[in-house]
Image: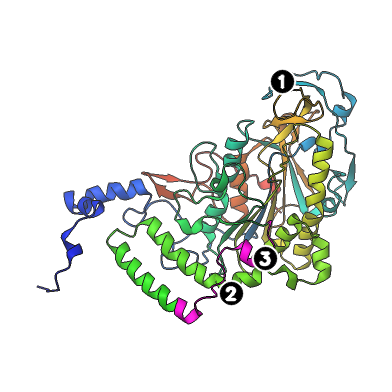
Amino acid sequence: MSHHPIRLEDAFLTRRDFLNRCGIGFGALGLASMLGQNALASGGTAPGPVNMDNPLAPRAPHFPAKAKRVIHIFANGGPSQVDTFDPKPALTKWHGKPLPMDLKTERKTGAAFGSPFSFQRYGQSGIEVSELFPHVAESIDDIAVIRSMTADVPNHEPSLMLMNCGDARLPRPSLGSWVTYGLGSENQNLPGFIAMCPNGYPIQESQNWQSGFLPGIYQGNYINSAHTEIDQLVEHIQNFATPRTAQRAQLDLLRQLNAQHAAKRQNEAQLEARIQSFELAYRMQLEATDAFAIAREPQAMREAYGDTVQGRQLLTARRLLERGVRFVQVWHGNGQPWDSHDDIEINHRKLARESDQAIGALLKDLKQRGMLDDTLVIWGGEFGRTPVVELPTAGANAGKVNGRDHNHHGFTMWLAGGGVRGGTVYGATDEFGFKAVEKPMHVHDLHATILALLGFDHEKLTYRHAGRDFRLTDVHGKVVRDLFV
């Protein structure tokens, strides 16, 4: 019989302790299921066991794959497909006339609205690209253009959630969180998933990069990329008051106390995430300072990307991927989104001017460094726009008749690198660009395809939560292998 000093805390039971000791522990098993813990009741199929001491340790996917990391360029607000990568000559011919088809639109719309932008063929593939994206077009032979994307509804909030998290309504882990959960990270001194969004949060805020019911270590780390100084980009990244040796000693003591606290609570996920965040923050102090220091890049490289927010974001993203970060989401259009209900010629031209040079430079830079082969680049928004003009209202278009409304029936996204078959056009919308009519590709199909490019069977990359195995694609999704090399 062991003896130990009487401790006051031993005289009390937490609710979790009570459930654990009653009914031979069955209450705790139920509670663990409700909380999404997999420590007491494991389930689902993962690529391999997660190292709970180091949950970001690199892990092998289900099968060999070319793509090892991701840059997701999110064009916030919904770019117009017929003004960017899906030319429609018939729309120009019908400009100003009612279209001979019934359009189910969110608001009242009017006559056909031909694109104010010209298109030109590029590369050996001869794919047509709008004058808005001449720099991106120079790499068209490395790009697969998907012209038949579909979503569920023409509203920003649910469509953002669907594109980022695979569900339009319920809180679910984001794509970046699933990827980081599946693959871990190749650099333990930086977050595995970083979301760069300038000037604050977009619509739905941090839900766009949430970890949901996955452990908190897989959540995207938000960076306000409007800033240029490291102290502003990453708050409290440097500790000027305490030497690193003293910080290490403090953190060791804190970890010991937290470990004792966690042991009594069956390794509660939120507490584990907090402990891991302390450790990561400590390790980041040196590594992040270097990763975000784009001033160390040659001047010619900085000029190639451009001295813009998007240019700095994408150059930083490349530096992060070089250092082993697994998933970087780069937002564009926050503040003034691609949501052009009016003045589409002015607004789309401005937004494209802000992003085209940087994206074009990124694609060329990755290819020159040999990184494009195993880096998957994704571009697109949450939906597209109507081929007809939005009629005047007192709302978004301020009474003007020169913009387009939301359209989820057919829109465009593109993929590059990471095992993607470049110089390819997949699917098609109707002759006016409203609805996907050839090889429709739902967002669930896109997610299944992205995971397959990274080496995952989307039906097997699951996590046990609330009594069932969840996955990014829910109960949907088919892999589009026509996009693979």
Image x and y of residue 94, in percent: 87, 23
Q: Residue at x 87, y 52 (%)?
A: 123
Which contiguous range is marked in magenta? Answer: 226-247
Image x and y of residue 413, in percent: 71, 43
Q: Nearer the viewer, residue 298 or 468?
A: 298
Image x and y of residue 379, in percent: 71, 48
Q: Residues within 10 Å of mark 1 (few under 14, many from 20)?
A: some
Earlier in the chain: of badge 1 and badge 2, it is 1
For the residues carrying marks 2 and 3, which lies nearer the camera in this image?
A: 3
Magenta part, dominant SS: loop
Q: Nearer the viewer, residue 345 or 41?
A: 345
* Residue type for callout 1: Lys
Measure the alpha-carbon separation of dots 1 and 3: 46 Å
Measure the alpha-carbon separation of dots 2 and 3: 15 Å
Residue at the disc numbered 2: 286
Q: Quadrant of the N terminus?
A: bottom left
Image x and y of residue 158, in percent: 57, 36
Q: Are marks 1 and 3 in contact (CB under 8 Å)?
A: no
9 horizontally vs 445: left or right? left
Q: Residues within 10 Å of mark 3 (few under 14, many from 20)?
A: few
Q: Are marks 2 and 3 in contact (CB under 8 Å)?
A: no
Q: Residue at x 38, y 70 (%)?
A: 255
* Residue 387 visible in rendering: yes
* Residue type for callout 3: Glu
Q: Quadrant of residue 149?
A: top right
Is residue 235 magenta-colored?
Answer: yes
What numbered label is drawn on residue 229? Answer: 3
Residue at the disc numbered 1: 108
User: Callout 2: helix, strand or loop?
Assistant: helix
* Residue type for callout 2: Leu
